[in-house]
């Protein structure tokens, strides 16, 4: 039976919010509740509905955070090749109220906030005809981009992650070699991970990891070639490694130092301690004990909030569509133990900390004023935006052999309601740039926040002149 026949009632949006949406000329979607039995959490975790399905929208999938709000994409009846769209991205406040909606052509699957630009990437059409829409959450504007070349692997692009100013994308739905006894899903010999850059309205990609790359199996220590038949979701773990979810294979693939001469790949094969292979759609890596994992249940058209003060920082928690669970992953053996059971088809997941987390990035440009110059940096936070927080930092200027390094400490305040603050590190003169190799800013501990990667930002002045 279609779950929509079980709906009991529709929740009304408050009048003030409704008026604001109408004045903005945006589509209005009302939320409705489900009568079906919900999932069950195992102590010390609790589960509740964060966002019931807005009327007329179905098949939620990916989820991200920007500026203290939660963004969820609803694919509706759109197909993986882009037909029968559009998808709708809904922007929610932390108490589940709709702020704004965005129409995305075709099927949007991957949805990620880029902290280096302040924009959200909405990848489209993961099976074929891939494209990209970038959302500006401040203005509500959307901009479309196309790929400069057809995908070498024959499919599309599913998810994206941003690390150290670089952009990496998972190459989904690859053309596979014929199945064998050792590769029942078929072997991928094409790029599974690519690095992307945008020039104008075109996206150029270069291979980072191939489907038949040699990997180290975490559980056994042996060298393996994983099938990589289903490259899907992307995350960054507590160590700064890229983590690719090879969904149909039940594998997590960790990439250390991606796109560098020192790149190393590892494979963790997941299991549920039965003969049936578990598959997972998304994995999160909590950075603090207290917080919420938002889980998107695609078949239930619902977003759940899983709260706890006992998350393991640096641990892994995966949403399994095959088992209908959110589970804790043993990163040594791959065993997945449920912390929430009874979901229909959990997909996208997002960890949101109880205490604000801060990161630092550098601005792209130097500001020149007469003989002086300033090096710009941005401190950004994720979490509660209701209060101002003051973030401590230290600066190290690395000089040439003729000059000693100089260092000092500073503070920057992120105001209430804001997710970031900019500040500048002054250089005393143009002459100083001739002897200063780089300026590095490191975040220091404070009582109002936790520090997560990236905690250090560096500008190499020799690259700017």
Image (spheres, grey):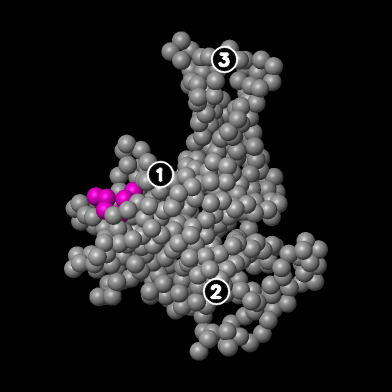
Relative depth, front residue between 180 and 389 = 180
Of the residues tagged 3 and 2, which is closer to the observer?
2
The image shows residue 448, relative to residue 30, as above or below, that is: above
Circle nearer the N terminus (1, 3) = 1
- The quadrant the C terminus occupies is top right
Residue 230 x/y as whole percent: 36, 62
Circle nearer the N terminus (2, 1) = 2
Circle nearer the N terminus (3, 2) = 2
Name the secondary structure under disc 3.
Answer: helix
Q: Which residue is mark 2?
A: 77
Q: Residue furthest top?
A: 402
Disc 1 to disc 3, C-alpha distance: 38 Å
Q: Which residue is mark 1?
A: 206
State the residue at coordinates (41%, 53%).
151
Name the secondary structure under disc 1.
Answer: strand
Residue 238 x/y as whole percent: 42, 49
Name the secondary structure under disc 2.
Answer: loop
Disc 2 to disc 1, C-alpha distance: 32 Å
Residue 241 x/y as whole percent: 39, 47
Relative depth, front residue between 7 and 29 = 29
**Residue 293 visible in the snapshot:** no
Residue 212 belongs to the span the image colors magenta: yes
Residue 86 belongs to the span the image colors magenta: no
State the residue at coordinates (32%, 36%).
261
Of the residues tagged 1 and 3, which is closer to the observer?
1
The quarter of the picture where residue 370 lies is: top right
State the residue at coordinates (73%, 64%).
26
Q: Are marks 2 and 1 in contact (CB under 8 Å)?
A: no
The residue range painted magenta reads 209-215
State the residue at coordinates (65%, 61%).
102
Q: Which residue is mark 3?
A: 432
């Amino acid at each position: 039976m279609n779950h929509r026949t079980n709906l009991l009632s529709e929740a009304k949006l408050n009048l003030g919010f409704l008026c604001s949406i109408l004045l903005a000329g945006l589509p209005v979607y009302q939320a409705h509740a489900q009568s079906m039995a919900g999932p069950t959490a195992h102590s010390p975790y609790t589960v509740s509905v964060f966002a019931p399905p807005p009327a007329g929208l179905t098949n939620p999938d990916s989820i991200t955070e920007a500026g203290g709000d939660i963004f969820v994409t609803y694919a509706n009846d759109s197909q993986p090749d882009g037909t029968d769209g559009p998808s709708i991205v809904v922007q929610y406040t932390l108490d589940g109220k709709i702020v704004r909606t965005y129409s995305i052509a075709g099927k949007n699957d991957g949805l990620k906030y880029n902290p280096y630009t302040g924009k959200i990437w909405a990848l489209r059409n993961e099976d074929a005809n891939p494209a990209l829409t970038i959302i500006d959450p401040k203005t509500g504007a959307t901009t479309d981009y196309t790929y400069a070349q057809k995908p070498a692997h024959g499919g599309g692009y599913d998810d994206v992650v941003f690390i150290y100013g670089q952009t990496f994308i998972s190459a989904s739905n690859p053309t596979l070699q014929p199945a064998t006894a050792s590769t029942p899903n078929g072997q991928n010999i094409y790029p599974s991970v690519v690095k992307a850059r945008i020039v104008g309205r075109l996206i150029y990609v270069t291979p980072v990891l191939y489907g038949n790359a040699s990997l180290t199996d975490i559980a056994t220590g042996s060298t393996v070639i994983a099938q990589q038949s289903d490259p899907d979701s992307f995350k960054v773990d507590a160590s700064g490694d890229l983590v690719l979810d090879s969904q149909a294979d039940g594998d997590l693939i960790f990439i250390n130092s991606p796109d560098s001469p020192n790149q190393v790949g590892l494979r963790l094969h997941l299991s549920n301690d039965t003969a049936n292979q578990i598959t997972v759609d998304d994995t999160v890596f909590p950075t603090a004990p207290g917080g919420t994992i938002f889980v998107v249940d695609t078949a239930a058209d619902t977003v759940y909030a899983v709260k706890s003060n006992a998350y393991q920082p640096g641990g892994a928690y995966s949403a399994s569509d095959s088992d209908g669970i959110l589970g804790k992953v043993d990163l040594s053996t791959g065993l997945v133990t449920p912390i929430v059971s009874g979901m229909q088809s959990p997909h996208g997941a997002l960890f949101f900390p109880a205490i604000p987390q801060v990161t630092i990035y550098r601005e792209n440009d130097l500001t020149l004023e007469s003989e002086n110059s300033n090096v710009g940096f941005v401190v950004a936070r994720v979490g509660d935006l209701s209060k101002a927080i003051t973030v401590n930092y230290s600066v190290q200027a690395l000089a040439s052999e003729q000059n000693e390094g100089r260092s000092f400490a500073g503070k920057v305040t992120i105001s209430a309601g804001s997710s970031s603050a900019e500040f500048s590190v002054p250089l005393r003169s143009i002459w100083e740039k001739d002897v200063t190799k780089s300026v590095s800013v490191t975040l220091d501990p404070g009582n109002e926040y936790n520090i997560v990667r990236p905690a250090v930002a560096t500008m190499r002045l020799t690259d700017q002149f």
